Image (cartoon, rainbow, N blue to C red):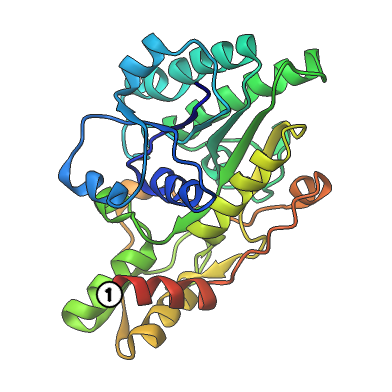
Amino acid sequence: MTVTVVTGAAGFIGSRLVAALNRRGIEDIVAVDHARREERAANLAGCRILDYLSPEAFLERFDGKARVVFHQGACTNTMVHDRDLMMRSNLEYSLKLLDKCQAARTPLIYASSAAVYGAGPDFREEPACEHPLNVYGESKLLFDQEVRRRIDADPGLAAQAAGLRYFNVYGPNEGHKAVMASMAFHGYHQVRKDGRIRLFTGSGGYGPGEQRRDFVFVEDTIAVNLWLLDNPGVSGVFNCGTGRAQSFNELATAVIKAVGQGLIEYIPFPAALEGKYQSFTQADLTRLRAAGCPVKFRPVEEGVAVYVKELTR
């Protein structure tokens, strides 16, 4: 039997991807994730899958044969400083998966991160732009570099290997991420609780709440994943963002408008984030568009409105 594999399937992007595959009629899905926890298991409620395996069990049993592997699983907490843990979870596991997929000629579509760019200021998929500020970003960059090395060595790679550098993704199914959830998520709950959204005061040369990020709605990232599925001849590392930086003030204003009430309050910038914070990100979409990807990305005003509707259900 040929199956579709989604690692990190009970997580944020992974669970939305499973649901999108179901909408295409794909149900023979092997969902790979850590032991079910209540807050993550809810993300797969209503989804149709064939099997659910731990990452360790899956890698041990997997012979590389699948329709495609969507590798969304990773340690995504940017505040984790345990280098060995991060490298085992994000680099070593991914390398083993890549080897198995290439040996079996199975497409691998995987999650990278804009964290590889660090403080920028340029966000192009080029080594000169890649200076991660934390071990999470470093682990993602090291795997991207290996994928690039293999493509450069053999442009006719045995099977598709495509990485998506997600920028600041927000949307349904991220609640389990707690402190690492998006500002859209936290802002919604803050304004519903006490009528105020709390943003940082100035940092990196930006005024209060004026730090700017490329905020991308989760369903738009899913659309890019599915485009890669439909175009197995496309390999490489690509940015996945809107191509437009918007301020946290704009994001908070979009949340307030969607909720119908609220104010913005500025709080001191945390000392722990000094030198480790991206005050500006903006995806350069040149390579993604050159590859033929037509996906349109929603600005925060549109994406947040959809998100808030779902949060209030």
- Look at 32% across and 21% down and name the residue there: 85
The reply to whether residue 222 is visible in this rendering is: yes
Mark 1 crowdedness (10 Å alpha carbons): few <14, some 14-19, many ≥20? few
Q: Position of residue 7 (x, y in %)?
A: 42, 31
Quarter location, residue 6: top left
Along the line of sight, which residue is nearer the eye, 159 or 261?
A: 159
The reply to whether residue 84 is visible in this rendering is: no
Q: How many numbered marks appear? A: 1
User: In this picture, is 37 found above or below 295?
Assistant: above
User: In this picture, is 61 found above or below 293?
Assistant: above
Along the line of sight, which residue is nearer the eye, 291 or 238?
A: 291
Judging by the rendered image, the residue that carries numbered circle 1 is 313
Q: Quadrant of the C terminus?
A: bottom left
Quarter location, residue 305: bottom left
Quarter location, residue 117: top right
Q: Position of residue 107 (x, y in %)?
A: 63, 26
User: In this picture, is 171 found above or below 39?
Assistant: below
Q: Position of residue 291 (x, y in %)?
A: 80, 44
Amino acid type, callout 1? Arg
Judged left or right of residue 186, residue 97 is right
- Look at 38% across and 23% down and name the residue there: 89
- Look at 71% across and 52% down and name the residue there: 284
Judged left or right of residue 220, residue 129 is right
